[in-house]
Amino acid sequence: MWVGWVALLVVLLVTVAFVGYRRRTDGRFRAVAPAGSAEPPRLTEADLGRPLGRDATVVQFSSEFCAPCRAAERVITDAVAEHDGVGYVDLDSAEKLDLTRRLNILRTPTVVITDRTGRVVHRTAGVPTKQSLQESVQAALSAGASR
């Protein structure tokens, strides 16, 4: 009988650890290519089906039945509206499967931010926080300005 309780305890601990990890990492942007690593991917007008933003572009990969994707869209459109020259593109990951695979996108929403040249500089999975999105957009603007 006690073996069942131990198994239940292990499952609960793993679940709590996983939920804690997801809460800590979801919606927080990370740099795509730390210093000294391989060149990060670049997105083009052909990839997105529309022009890149003048200074930076926020690209959201969504799916048809993704409720968090709608929440992410609201956060992104609010943040992008504060920056002239920053574009926003929402892509259906199923329709852009080749790009989804190339960028190794495993879940939706996933948000990537490019500088003015299309170089992916930050990414996150999950609904981004407005603060982390604004910080990442600023970093992309700075990265694009220095190129």
Image (cartoon, rainbow, N blue to C red):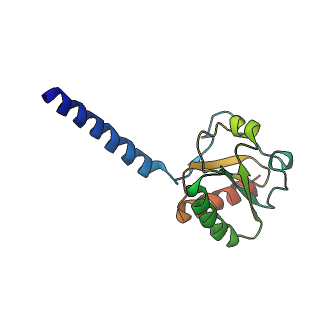
For residue 67, side relative to residue 115 (left or right): left
Identity of the residue drawn at 75% across and 70% down: 84
x, y percent for residue 34: 60, 40
Report x, y in % for residue 108: 60, 47
In the picture, measured across the screen, residue 38 lies left or right of residue 28, that is right
Furthest toward the left, the residue is: 2
Q: Quadrant of residue 127?
A: bottom right
Please give the name of the residue rendered at 58% of the width and 43% of the height, measured from the top-left corner.
107
Left or right: 49 as drawn, with respect to 26: right
Q: Is residue 53 above or below residue 120?
A: below
Q: Nearer the viewer, residue 38 or 124?
A: 124
* Quarter of the figure with residue 11: top left
Return the x and y of residue 60 as percentages of the image width and height. 67, 53
Relative image position of residue 115 (x, y in whole percent): 73, 53
Q: Residue shown at 70%/45% (left/top)?
A: 93
Q: Nearer the viewer, residue 14 or 27?
A: 14
Question: Which residue: 84% across, 55% down?
Answer: 50
Residue farthest along the front direction in this orientation: 1
The residue nearer to you, when weighing 138 against 16, is 16
Rendered-image quadrant of the N terminus:
top left
